[in-house]
Amino acid sequence: MRNNNRAIRPLITFCLVLPLLLFISLAQAAQIEKLLEQAEKGSAKSQTELGFVYELWKGVPEDPQKAATWYRKAAEQGYAQAQTNLGSFYESGVSGSEIVLDRATGLIWQKGYETNKTWLEALATCEESSHGGQTDWRLPNFFELMSLANPGRTAPASDFPGSATEEIWSSTSNPNYVAKAFRLDFRSGYGYYNPLKSTALDARCVRGGP
């Protein structure tokens, strides 16, 4: 009989705890739904808290991209905590070298940047780089470069650590005029298709991605 009691106790404990766990889950779901409603209405505080929820897996599956999206929305409104949290998505010193991991996109960037490069020189510089012992560096495309921009900030218009306040080349050519390519102005956070590829701008190399 004593052995039977020992076997039954865990089952009784589970039956007592299960309703509590369900109650907590329902309460979390209701709280997250309320946060989402306020965030979609433009509340910077709620957007920041929702980003925190997605970053640290508080009642929802962990999703760094969604976390960064909500932090960015709040940061663009000048919400200081969101700007701080967004900055934390960039981890410096990966593998002991001056590279930066963007946890929101999974891209790995060189922390430093090359100056006074034509478009062709920028392409070659990245492709020939062995920075950090890696040889698959490349010039970022339009969308990858734009992922570093934060239009809610200026000079620099980015949360990237040590971000330049200059114009940075992308690998994306102007589809209507191949002698020009896309650049991002990190002073304003806006991109342009107008510079000739012979113009001397800056370049930051990237690796990873699809």
Image (cartoon, grey):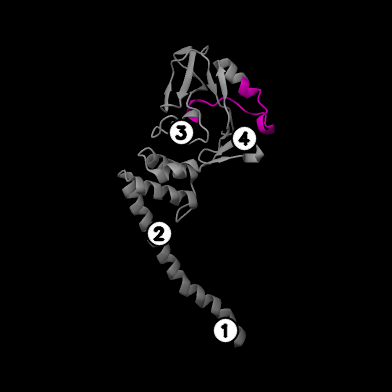
In the image, residue 175 lies in the stretch drawn in magenta = no
Q: Residues within 10 Å of mark 4 (few under 14, many from 20)?
A: some
Going by the picture, which residue comes out furthest to the bottom?
1
Q: How many marks?
A: 4
Whole-Å distance between the Cαs marked 1 and 2? 35 Å
Secondary element under disc 4, as helix, strand or loop, is loop
- The residue labelled by disc 1 is 5
**Quadrant position of the C terminus in the picture:** top right
Numbered mark located on residue 158 in the image: 3
Residue at 39 percent across and 57 percent down: it is 29
Secondary element under disc 1, as helix, strand or loop, is helix
Q: CB under 8 Å between callouts 1 and 2? A: no
Say whether disc 4 or disc 3 marks the residue closer to the N-terminus.
4
**Magenta segment:** 125-144
- The residue labelled by disc 2 is 28
Q: Residues within 10 Å of mark 1 (few under 14, many from 20)?
A: few
Whole-Å distance between the Cαs marked 4 and 3? 18 Å
Whole-Å distance between the Cαs marked 4 and 1? 61 Å
